[in-house]
Image: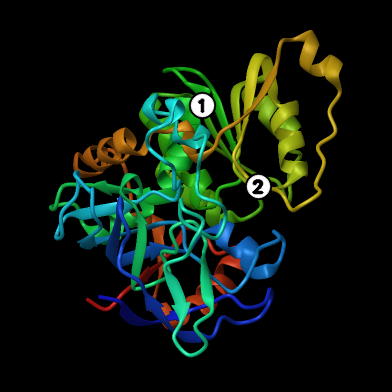
Amino acid sequence: MDLLIDVPVLVAAQQKMPMTKVVVADPKAGEVRVKMFASGVCHSCLHAYDGSHATPMPMILGDEGSGIVESVGSGVTTLVPGDHVIISWLLNCGTCPPCRDGKPAHCWAPSPFGALLDNTQRFKNAETGESVLHYGPATYAPYTVVPESSAIKIRKDMPLDKAALIGCSVTTGFGSVTNAAGARPGESVAIVGCGGVGLNAVQGARVAGANPIIAIDTSDAALQMAKKFGATHLINAAREDVVAETLKICPRGVNYSIAAVGSTKAMQNGVEILGAGGTMVILGAPPNGAVLELDPIFILGRERGIRGSKYGSSNPHVEFPMLIELYLAGKLDLDSLVTGNYRIDQSNEAFEVLAKGGAGRGLITFDQ
């Protein structure tokens, strides 16, 4: 049965999202409908909200969340109503070779932006009947519909509010160090940008046994959070020369740098602090049209490398349960990540706080 919900809908960049009555359709074959418990407030959605990334509209935002399966479509075999799930924003087919090889970020047939795998929507404006687009899994809705492969079943004793953070920022940041970089105990890691994703890169470095772990940001509040999460050294890029200060700590350069902010200046610093054989992992998404200029001799001469990492180069079906075990064992701090709590009708306020550089992660929770 279709459901009627109130949800913030993005209708124009740099304008507040109006609460709108939307109809949520039943899940189709291979899909599930999830009653959302919580959703993180993500920089990717902020880029759509402020217009720095071109985004079709009208659209329901949200790419990080958790909830409980409310209903399932035909052919669903791994989930039943009542299952607790984390939503993966990678709406992948689950059957192509990359998906079966545990690399869903390289899916051959992912959902088109704004739609599910069949290129249609499950949301409609209740008044006009117009389709409303999905921002990935559209976790800013009290109910959402996603492919079965994008709802990852988790143990029921995991707090669902903290589980929501695993859906994007934790997995992306943590995996950039443990998967993409493959940092080993005693290797040096510098995290450039300590927002929600960067803080989790710090945690990934700590769990991996990296040393030193250098946190770089322009916010003292973010740097102090990074210290709490395991950073051994702090550099404020607004007051200090990032390259010079990093080389004081690691005179031969770092083994890995993680560019966790969409700034080409930050990425430039991330390259220049690399030691011989070092690698920069790019996580942050710069504005449309941004260009990074590099001296190829600097890369060639000491065999430095640059690689991208989408979603922490992870397989959510493996990574989500592992991260939950780390949290429940006291080795992964999710509680301290949450620095703001909001209702769904306060999503505009949540974005405004994020845009001002608020440390940590905002969390939207839904009425239960």
Q: Residue at x 49, y 40 (%)?
A: 311
Quadrant where the image shows the N terminus: bottom left
Relative to 40, 142 lies left or right: left
In this picture, is 328 found above or below 50?
above
Task: Pick the residue in front: 223 or 255.
Answer: 255
Can the viewer see residue 231 in this picture? no
Marks 2 and 1, Cα distance to the nearest angstrom? 16 Å
Quarter assignment of residue 130: bottom right
Relative to 16, 363 lies left or right: left
Residue 54 is tagged as none
Relative to 35, 132 lies left or right: right
The amino acid pointed to by label 2 is Ala
How far across and down, in percent of the image, does residue 122 sit? 42, 67
Residue 180 is tagged as 1
Assess disc 2: are there few (<14), some (14-19) or many (≥20) residues with their C-alpha within 10 Å of its C-alpha. some
Residue lying farthest to the bottom in this orientation: 127
How far across and down, in percent of the image, does residue 11 sit? 62, 78
Task: Pick the residue in front: 284 or 240.
Answer: 284
Q: Are marks 2 and 1 in contact (CB under 8 Å)?
A: no
Q: Residue at x 27, y 78 (%)?
A: 367
Q: Residue at x 64, y 17 (%)?
A: 278
Assess disc 1: are there few (<14), some (14-19) or many (≥20) residues with their C-alpha within 10 Å of its C-alpha. many
> Circle 1 sits in a helix, a strand or a loop, which is it?
helix
How far across and down, in percent of the image, does residue 332 sit? 31, 41
Task: Pick the residue in front: 103 or 366.
Answer: 103
Query: In the rendered structure, which disc, 2 or 1, sits on the residue that comes first in sequence?
Result: 1
Quarter assignment of residue 189: top right
Residue annotated with mark 2: 285
The amino acid pointed to by label 1 is Ala
Task: Pick the residue in front: 225 or 317.
Answer: 317
